Image: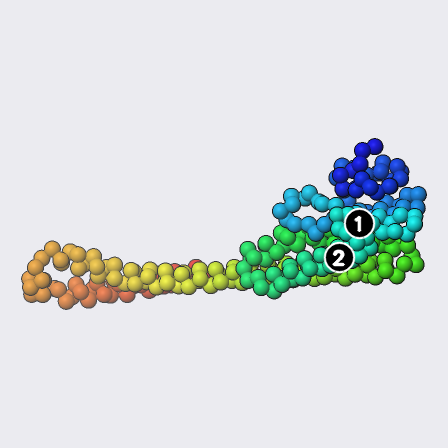
C-alpha cells in the first residue's frame, strides 16, 4: 500500500494500521494495533480552512520511542501541539473582551466554532491514549491539559454568545428609543399642522388682496379669530385621536 501523505515514509508502521488510514486524516482518534500507538490529531483549525483539516500525527512504537510529524520532538511535540491550541483560545478570549459590536462578536464565533469542535475531539483522542497507557503520568497530564482547553473554549463560547445577545438587545432598544422620539416629533408636527391649517387657508384667501385693503375690511379680525378657533378645534381632535391610538 502507498504511503499516506501525512505519514512520513520512514515510519515503519504495521500493515494493520496502514489499512485503517485514508487519504485525509479524518476525525481525531487513536489507532492501537500490534503494539503500535498512532495518535491522529488536527492542527489548530481556522475558519478560512473550509473544513479541510491538516494532520498532526504522533507514533509510539513498541520500543517506547515517540515520533511526530509535521512537528518535531516526539512527545515534546505533543506538548507544543497543546500549547498552540492554548494560544489560539487565549487569542479568542482577548478578542471577546475587546468586541463591542455584533459584527465583532460574529467574527469571534466564526473562528471559535471549528476550534471548539477540534478541542473536544482532541480530548476524546487523548482520553483513549490515556486508557491505552494508564500508568504514564505524562499522558495523564496531557489529557488533563486537553480537558482544561475544552473548558476554556466553552467559556469563550459562552462569553461570545452572551456578548452577541447583549449587543443585539441593546441595539434593538436604542432603535426602539429612536423610533419613539421620531414618533413624538411626528405627533408634534401633526398637531402644529392641524392648528395652522385653517388659518393658513384663510391667509391664502386673503393674500390675494393688498395687505392695506385686508386690514381695513370690517370682518378681518373676526375671520382671523375664527381661523384660530378652528385651528384649536382641529388641534384638539388630532390630539385626542393620538391618545386613543396609543
Q: Look at the image and name its color scheme.
A: rainbow
Number of other residues with Cα within 10 Å of mark 1, as a class: few under 14, some 14 to 19, many 20 or more: many
Where residue 122 appears, as percent x and y from the top left, is 78, 52
Where residue 236 appears, as percent x and y from the top left, is 33, 64
In the displayed structure, does residue 187 sit left or right of residue 201?
right
Depth check: give the residue in front, 168 or 208.
168
| Quadrant including the N terminus | top right
Labels 1 and 2 touching (C-beta < 8 A): no
Compared with 243, 118 (above or below) is above
Q: Which mark is residue 204?
A: none
Q: For residue 241, which quarter of the picture?
A: bottom left
- Say which label, 1 or 2, has the lower sequence index: 1
Where residue 244 appears, as percent x and y from the top left, is 43, 61
Dot 1 lies on which element? strand
In the displayed structure, does residue 22 sit left or right of residue 230?
right
Mark 2 highlights which residue? Answer: 80
Depth check: give the residue in front, 52 or 120.
52
Dot 2 lies on which element? helix
Where residue 197 appears, as percent x and y from the top left, is 25, 59
Q: Which mark is residue 68?
A: 1
| Quadrant including the C terminus | bottom left
Residue at 29 percent across and 60 percent down: it is 193
Q: CA distance from mark 1 to mark 2?
A: 11 Å
Residue at 36 percent across and 60 percent down: it is 186
Number of other residues with Cα within 10 Å of mark 2, as a class: few under 14, some 14 to 19, many 20 or more: some
On the question of residue 120 being in view, the answer is no
Compared with 223, 31 (above or below) is above
Residue at 77 percent across and 62 percent down: it is 148
On the question of residue 87 being in view, the answer is yes
Q: For residue 195, which quarter of the picture?
A: bottom left
In the displayed structure, does residue 193 sit left or right of residue 155?
left
Amino acid at each position: 500500500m502507498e504511503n499516506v501523505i501525512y505519514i512520513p515514509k520512514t515510519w515503519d508502521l504495521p500493515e494493520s494500521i496502514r489499512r485503517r488510514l485514508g487519504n485525509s486524516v479524518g476525525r481525531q482518534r487513536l489507532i492501537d494495533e500490534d503494539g503500535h500507538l498512532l495518535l491522529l490529531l488536527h492542527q489548530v483549525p481556522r475558519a478560512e480552512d473550509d473544513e479541510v483539516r491538516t494532520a498532526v500525527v504522533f507514533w509510539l512504537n513498541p520500543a517506547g520511542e515517540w515520533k511526530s510529524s509535521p512537528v518535531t520532538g516526539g512527545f515534546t511535540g505533543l506538548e507544543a501541539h497543546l500549547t498552540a491550541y492554548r494560544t489560539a483560545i487565549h487569542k479568542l478570549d482577548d478578542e471577546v473582551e475587546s468586541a463591542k459590536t455584533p459584527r465583532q462578536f460574529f467574527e469571534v464565533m466564526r473562528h471559535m466554532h471549528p476550534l471548539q469542535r477540534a478541542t473536544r475531539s482532541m480530548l476524546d483522542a487523548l482520553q483513549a491514549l490515556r486508557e491505552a497507557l494508564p500508568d504514564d503520568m505524562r499522558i495523564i497530564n496531557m489529557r488533563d491539559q486537553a480537558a482544561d482547553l475544552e473548558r476554556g473554549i466553552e467559556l469563550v463560547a459562552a462569553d461570545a454568545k452572551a456578548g452577541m445577545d447583549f449587543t443585539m438587545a441593546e441595539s434593538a432598544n436604542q432603535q426602539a428609543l429612536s423610533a419613539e422620539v421620531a414618533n413624538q416629533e411626528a405627533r408634534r408636527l401633526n398637531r402644529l399642522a392641524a392648528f395652522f391649517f385653517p388659518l393658513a387657508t384663510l391667509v391664502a384667501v386673503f393674500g390675494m388682496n393688498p395687505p392695506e385693503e385686508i386690514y381695513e375690511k370690517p370682518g378681518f379680525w373676526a375671520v382671523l379669530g375664527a381661523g384660530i378657533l378652528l385651528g384649536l378645534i382641529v388641534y384638539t381632535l388630532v390630539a385626542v385621536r393620538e391618545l386613543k391610538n396609543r
